Amino acid sequence: MIRFENVGLRYGMGPEILRDISFHLPERSFQFLSGPSGAGKTTLLRLLFMSLKPTRGLITVFGRDLSRIPRNELPMLRRRVGIVFQDFRLLDHMTTYENVSLPLRVRGREEASYRSDVIELLKWVGLGERMHVLPPVLSGGEKQRAAIARALIEQPEILLADEPTGNVDPPLARRLLRLFIELNRLGTAVVIATHDVALMEQVDARRMVLSGGRLEIHD
Amino acid sequence: MTDPATMPGAPLRRMAAARSHRKQAPIVPPANVAGHALILVIAIMTFLSCLTLGAVTLVRDTAAMWQTQIAREATVQIKPIEGLDMEAALASAQRVAASFPGVRQARIVERDATIRLLEPWLGTGFDINELPVPRLVIVTIDPANPPDFAALRQAVIGEVPQATLDDHRTWVDRLIAMANTTVTIGFSVLVLMLVATVLAIVFATRGAMSGNGHIIEVLHFVGAEAGFIAGQFRRHFLLTGMKGAAGGGIAAIIVFIGFSWWSSWNLATPEADQATALFGNFAIGSAGYIGVALVVLLIGALTAVTSHVTVVSYLGDIDPSHNA
């Protein structure tokens, strides 16, 4: 689905942050992306989300060479990729329901056409009772689940999660992990960037470890 | 059985239900503190720009009025000398002038009118025939097609050698020079004012936009196209700009109407006479009001364009592919 071949990235004239990265993310796969802080996990996620261009190497996204995709087609491709940030990035002036439905709203869809889907998804992530609450009132775990629901509302083919358990306690982290596993079982490929070893030990999944700008893969 | 509507907590549920059916929150949040400050800055700058525009319009109209009023008349003056038949000289000067091309009318200032003109200096009850008082013929000129003054002078002097023609040229030239200088200064001040307004609004809009970076980012990451994101902010800031600009423009119009009302209210007083002599009746006219409306539209558009440029440059920062 997404393939990297000898990808390297540097910002401006600085040193290469990522060097000779090669891997393939198959459909319906589940993997952790780990490594120490500052190893480039978030940068690699941004490359996967097509919001950065590599300085060298080849990235193939859904069978197309990223460097040949016209700029105006990128938002359409990005809709096939869901992304969850460590700091949630919810909009504080919108309710949970409005935050989760935002990806559909920016596509210009009528609210009546997606209302029941959003409510169903909110119930699935356990926020059925909190859908008309503004984010500042939500707990950390609730915010994280709202952010995940927003990433899932367009039924992406791949979900990228940047430290999704970084701000929650271990029981909630396990609950969120079960959510990701359930999602993967339903057919979505999942990449979880984390340095939480305890979390990774709970699942027998592929581990991609970034260190010194290089990537090692442990299947 | 208990009626659900009377159960405890029913009002809360009704509120929740009402909220669930309300209109969705706008993507760009309603004005925050920076937004209110922006509206205020825009209102003040629009007000000052419109006042400057009004003042320039007033000066320009007044300058034009001075020019036409004075340029509309010339005077033939006939000095009395021994043996001159003044009435016959006046009549022939009037006849020559009236028949000249570009002259609408030539009118003799009658003996009684001349006496009245001299009353403030000589008092009443004097005999004009005993004094060597020059007499006048007022020549009304067609401003659209003025006569050749040199030829007119020749024609009048040819008929009445004692006559002189004053076409007020010296006065008119001086007034035109003064009026042009005043209008040029006024337009320079207006240009400076508009440049200051543009800069103040650009920077205030960028300031108000800086608090919205996270919204641009979120919209980008949920797959919104750059055009959609820019459109949302453009619409929001167009409304903000128009709100502030309309406030400033309306305040300026109220000031103009107030001045106009004040000048007509004090029409009979010496102060108002003085002001009216200088500035006409303080009305800025339809051109002034159209100018105010244009300034309001321009400032609204400027705010929208600034927000658009800011969004596009912000997207360029978070997504280099926008610059590709």
Image (cartoon, coloured by chain):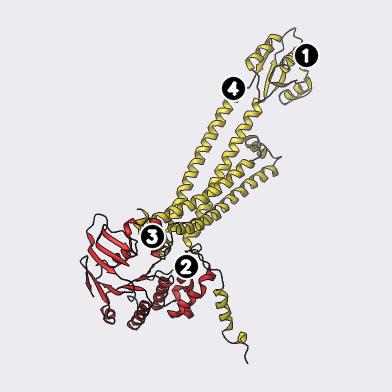
User: Amino acid type of disc 3?
Assistant: Leu
- Residues marked 2 and 1 touching at CB (< 8 Å): no
Name the residue carrying label 2: A104
Name the residue carrying label 3: A74
Q: Chain of mark 3?
A: A
Foreground of the two, B287 or B280: B287
In primary-sequence order, the first of circles 2 and 3 is: 3
Give the residue at x 78% y 19%. Answer: B111
In the rendered view, would you say B44 is above or below B143?
Answer: below
Residue A105: give x, y in percent of width and height. 49, 66
Which quadrant of the view contains residue A90? Answer: bottom left
User: Alpha carbon of mark 2 to alpha carbon of mark 1: how far?
Assistant: 96 Å
User: Amino acid type of disc 1?
Assistant: Glu
User: Amino acid type of disc 2?
Assistant: Leu
Secondary structure category for the residue under label 4? helix
Q: Does residue A133 appear in this view?
A: no
Foreground of the two, B158 or B123: B158
User: Alpha carbon of mark 3 to alpha carbon of mark 1: how far?
Assistant: 96 Å
User: Alpha carbon of mark 2 to alpha carbon of mark 4: how far?
Assistant: 76 Å
Which quadrant of the view contains residue A58? Answer: bottom left
Per the rendering, the mark at residue B170 is 4
Q: Colour of chain A?
A: red
Residue A75: give x, y in percent of width and height. 40, 61
